Amino acid sequence: MEVRDIFETMDYGPAPESPDVAKEWLQERDGVLDHFIAGKWATPESEEYFASNNPANGELLAMVADGNEADVNLAVAAAADALEGWVAIGGHGRARYLYAMARHIQKNSRLFSVLESLDNGKPVRESRDIDIPLVARHFYHNAGWAQVMHDQLPGYRPIGVVGQIIPWNFPLLMLAWKVAPALAMGNTVVLKPAEYTSATAALFADMCREVGLPKGVFNLVLGDHKAGAALTNHQDIGKLAFTGSTEVGRILRRATAGTGKKLTLELGGKSPFIVFEDSDLDSVVEGLVDAIWFNQGQVCCAGSRLLVQESIAEQLHSKIRNRMSKLVLGDSLDKGIDIGALVDPVQLENIRKLVDLGVEEGGQLWQPQSTMPDTGCYYPPSLITDVQPSATLAQEEIFGPVLVSMTFRTPAEAVALANNSRYGLAASVWTENINLALDVAPKLKAGTVWVNCSNTFDAASGFGGYRESGFGREGGKEGLYEYVKPFWESRLSKEPVQQLPRFTPVDDVSGDEAPEIDRTSKLYIGGRQVRPDGGYSNAAYDATGKVIAEIPAGNRKDIRNAVEAAHAASSWSSTTAHNRAQVLYYIAENLSARSAEFLGRIARLSGKEEASARAELDLCIRRIYYYAAMCDKYDGAVHATPFRNVTLAMKEPLGVIGIVAPEEAGLLGFISTVMPAIAMGNRVVVVPSQHYALLATDFYQVLDTSDLPGGVLNIVTGDQDVLAEVLAKHYDLEGMWYWGSRQGSRMVEEEAAATMKRTWVNYGLYHDWENDEQGQGESFLRKATEIKNIWIPYGE
Ligand code: NAD
């Protein structure tokens, strides 16, 4: 036998990592994990603990404090007490703490990674080489943001006490994604980890103590959904950041509706992994290992839906099977394994059920003859072919090492299949043709697109979902905005700033005056004036209470038609920013050309003196100019991610947005809310102010002469609160903005939970629309866009 033969035939032996140091750390605490509140360990008020086991062998790892409302109250109070001091030490002071935390994590990285693998079941190779280095990277990166916050985010301030709830799949990494930016921006934190995985969060708390983090800046409450719900409902948190399932995300959207708590939801996914026929198939196979077998497939953005071009499907499936049969399953502390244990028997059962269902629905299941450990929660890597796009397995998140495969023929079909999902977290595109990759990337509805790579993350890049994968971004500069609020928000008024005229309606127009019904106003849908479906109208009054016209009373069908028209105008979202700017300038020009008519109307409806009406009109024109200017200036970024990539952070329109314009603010309120949305490429269905509806219906005359494509701006007049509810419930809107009452705001946020549409509501507070700080600016543009991060191979 030659040495070469020995290398080729020799089996890998086990390469065990010692659990001793991690077990010692647990033993120092008598195997008990407590809350960490105000810089000290705190036993649960209930005195209850539950068991947390090592999923690789079922052995007891620790007893975990079962937190409840009383514990959450203490933790939030501690965070509130610490807030002032944490803000006062300034960006540099906070940067030094975050830097110390990053260093401490690096110095104790092996302890962190071993404890993580014992608790979660993930291979220690992954926790050592991926999770923990990324955790340190997030603290370094955000130490930097703390340092430069003053220069880089002028006009913003911390939110206050932030509640954070995380899942079990990347316990410490999810903690880092949330805690590092929150602390950097001057907030204090109460974090609740998942009940299955509390150990590294407790180790992190211990580290906060060791680095001397001021008491109460970071607080940890352990426990299950009870503690999560108490944190969600606590009235002293200004923000809730959640990562977990879409189901729980919906509960939290409803629970926080109308409270004014800022909310980010990082939810589930069913991410497509698209392989074109010219791909380098060996790289594709390794990419798939990262996409679906990394962390046992328990990854929110796992490439779980393989879409492969028909011409190479068989060849690729055969290569995948071959690679799958070489994947080694085993104990998480064995460095020679590829796939560890699933987090809990409950999860194992879920996967089994879903796979059985997939087979019943006609999927062809293939699993290698892997050797499985005798005990623990293991599931073999699985490939399911012949899956229909509508099948459960193609639509539902499995959250396990199960790849489902479908074929396509053309790039257009690949995009259609990829987007045929209620989720939109990530997508991976494989082709050697850069033109094809960059043609497909903008068409994919996903927050992250990886070109010829998969599951690549970095603190400098934003991450987050489209659609039911949630909203908000974590990482990058875009992620920081989730942990700050603009100063101007605190200056919003409880009373209307712009006033509606006070009058008593005068329905009987007596005397010799001719009736003043001077123009038949209609709805404006798809670029055409249309009669309302219901055939009803409401009276329009002038500032003295005299009826001057009839305004159509739109209904549910009118909204439905308007939304359809808006969807049909999708080319507005892909046209160039330069084109959009020209149309907006043209709108301003045509509005200016009709000054006399609009001045008369503003004066008549508002009772304003001529000079004041002119000031409003001038401000409207200036504001349209502002948004025309910003069309091609509120642009994206290239993130400095530390791999062979450039990461393009592209700002994309939400899609179709429903807007309920402020009732009291006349033409200015209409322009100020509609223009930023269309400037960024959205299509809009707007319900204008009821009192000032005639100004909106006059405005479509301006639109008709301004080259705005039909369907981009649709105007449905009528009862604002009735139509707001129809918009909020609509399944085909991506966003909804609402300026109205407190109850209306709550209703919008509650109803939006069904589709996870992005909402922006005023909670019954009033903007001063004449003030540029409150009436225009980047805050409006940010709400009109979401960021897609596209990772492209670049450089050496
Ligand atoms: P989960 O939603 O069951 O639990 C997440 C967290 O919420 C846990 O801490 C849990 O205790 C808490 N919780 C449960 N019910 C609650 C309630 N009613 N009120 C408040 N808190 C409550 O999710 P999971 O099973 O732990 O994690 C898996 C899910 O997380 C998957 O859907 C996955 O896609 C998603 N995930 C998303 C991302 C992302 O960035 N988008 C990252 C990782 C995981």
Image (cartoon, rainbow, N blue to C red):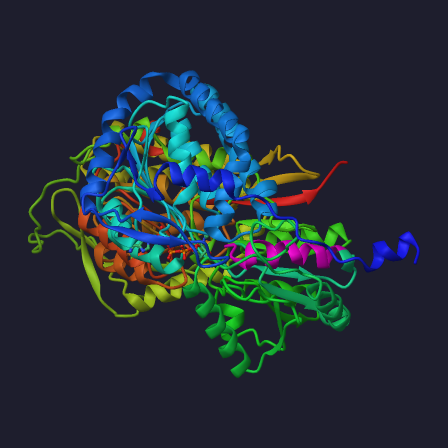
Residue drawn 61% across the image and 51% down it: 334
Magenta residue check for 293:
yes
Compared with residue 405, is residue 170 higher up or lower down, i.e. above or below? above
Compared with residue 489, is residue 113 higher up or lower down, i.e. above or below? below
Question: Is residue 236 or residue 694 the one in the foreground?
Answer: 236
Compared with residue 776, is residue 305 higher up or lower down, i.e. above or below? below
Compared with residue 773, is residue 25 higher up or lower down, i.e. above or below? below
Magenta residue check for 480:
no
Q: Which residues are magenta?
A: 283-300
State which quadrant residue 222 falls in.
top left
Question: Is residue 557 or residue 127 the one in the foreground?
Answer: 127
Give the image location of residue 401, x and y in percent: 57, 63
Give the image location of residue 307, x and y in percent: 65, 66
Residue drawn 61% across the image and 66% down it: 381
Give the image location of residue 369, x and y in percent: 66, 72
Query: Which quadrant would the N terminus be assigned to in this image?
Result: bottom right
Dividing the image into four equal quarters, which quarter contains ligand 1?
bottom left
Give the image location of residue 181, x and y in percent: 43, 32
Q: Is residue 25 left or right of residue 131?
A: left
Question: Is residue 442 or residue 514 the one in the foreground?
Answer: 442
Q: Is residue 762 left or right of residue 452?
A: left
